[in-house]
Image: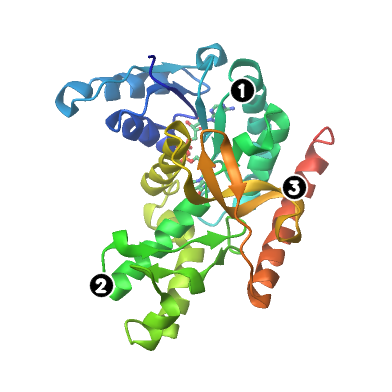
Amino acid sequence: MPRPKIALIGAGHIGGTLAHLAALRELGDVTLFDVTAGTPRGKALDIAEAAPPAGFDAVLTGTDSYADIEGADICIVTAGVPRKPGMTRDDLLSVNLGVMKAVGDGIRTHAPGAFVICITNPLDAMTWALQRYSGLPAERVVGMAGVLDSARMRHFLALDMGVSVKDVSAFVLGGHGDTMVPMIRHATVAGIPLPELIAAGWTTAERVDAIVERTRNGGAEIGALLGTGSAYYAPATAALEMAEAVLKDQKRVLPCSCRLSGEFGQSGLNIGVLTILGAAGVERIVELSLTEDEQREFEASAAAVRTLIGACRALDPAL
Ligand code: TXD
């Protein structure tokens, strides 16, 4: 049986890390695509040469031709320009919209059966545009942000309480950006809800508020430390968790940016919600009930995403 084919569109920091992780985990053969062939071919060869000491079987190729993504089972899209310090995610919109058009055309022509994970910022608007440009079904084109934002929150909670990240469960809803909605009341340690842990003195409401704030600024914190570029180890790891869920039909319950059709009172936009991810892609959107505050925050987040989608439509009326 042939190995699954994973196409990585964009061979920069996240694309290269994705290729390395996918190979180490033997998730499939990897095709790295970028606008010039040198970088993807160089990274593919470098990772392939890691196979003997690491002991993995995977074929890695680099290309600047969309024909080489033919038949991909998964496409993970990082193509575009990353955020620089002082630049908002929204500043990236017009450059990256043009990139999504090119990538959407490539996927439509060569990998129409793929499950597509968009990582390019501004995340929710780019995922929305990529789905429109590619013409693939909405349940097969999602954005990665929620798994990363949730991972950051889990890391901070684990640090704060001195417990293993393995035992911390938490998720965020809403758009990727300052308006994300961290679902504190659903966070748990080994199944014990966070409000109970606060009552028992494991942490305090003030510390949790600070963690929520740090989660919201997680991307900017790393960008400022790095000086140039943005986070890539955790984003790549988060996207691979989603890809693996689909490749192995795991039915994982993971937050991702999905097209809504009435859920949470919203339609026609992509935004972060909890989903069940399996072989069919987004197999279900989990409609949990929100408190009034959460609903209000979710609506504010949706409004922010709608503004960006409006800006995309103004740039390309064909969308
Ligand atoms: O949670 C999240 N979704 C994110 C998103 C977390 C971190 C970073 N996030 C965004 O991912 C970031 O703002 C960027 O928009 C993407 C990719 O970040 P990365 O750090 O990998 O950026 P790089 O290293 O600049 O890589 C981008 C590559 C680079 O090699 C370009 O040559 C290539 O994209 N590129 C293209 N590839 C294919 N086709 C086109 N048109 C193209 N244009 C640029």
Cα separation between marks 2 and 3 = 41 Å
Residue 279 in the image: state x and y as whole percent: 51, 33
Q: Is residue 82 visible?
A: no
Quarter of the image holding residue 25?
A: top left
Q: Residues within 10 Å of mark 3 (few under 14, many from 20)?
A: many
Residue 194 in the image: state x and y as whole percent: 42, 76
Give the residue drawn at x 55%, y 31%: 115
Please tell me the numbered disc located at residue 126.
none
Q: Is residue 2 visible?
A: yes
Q: Earlier in the sequence, mark 2 or mark 1?
A: 1
Which of pointers 2 and 3 indicates the residue nearer the eye?
Answer: 2
Q: Residues within 10 Å of mark 2 (few under 14, many from 20)?
A: few
Quadrant placement of the C terminus: top right
Give the residue drawn at x 49%, y 19%: 36
Apparent side of residue 304 relative to residue 45 in the rendered image (left or right): right
* Residue 254 position (above or below residue 119): below
Q: Earlier in the sequence, mark 3 or mark 1?
A: 1
Dot 1 lies on which element? helix
* Camera-nearest residue between 151 and 196: 196
Three-letter amino acid code at the position of disc 1: Ile
Dot 2 lies on which element? loop
Apparent side of residue 240 relative to residue 144 in the rendered image (left or right): left
Give the residue drawn at x 73%, y 34%: 132
- Residue corresponding to mark 2: 162
Residue 302 in the image: state x and y as whole percent: 71, 59
Three-letter amino acid code at the position of disc 2: Gly
Quarter of the image holding residue 292?
A: bottom right
- Residue corresponding to mark 1: 107
Please tell me the numbered disc located at residue 309.
3
Dot 3 lies on which element? helix
Quadrant placement of the N terminus: top left
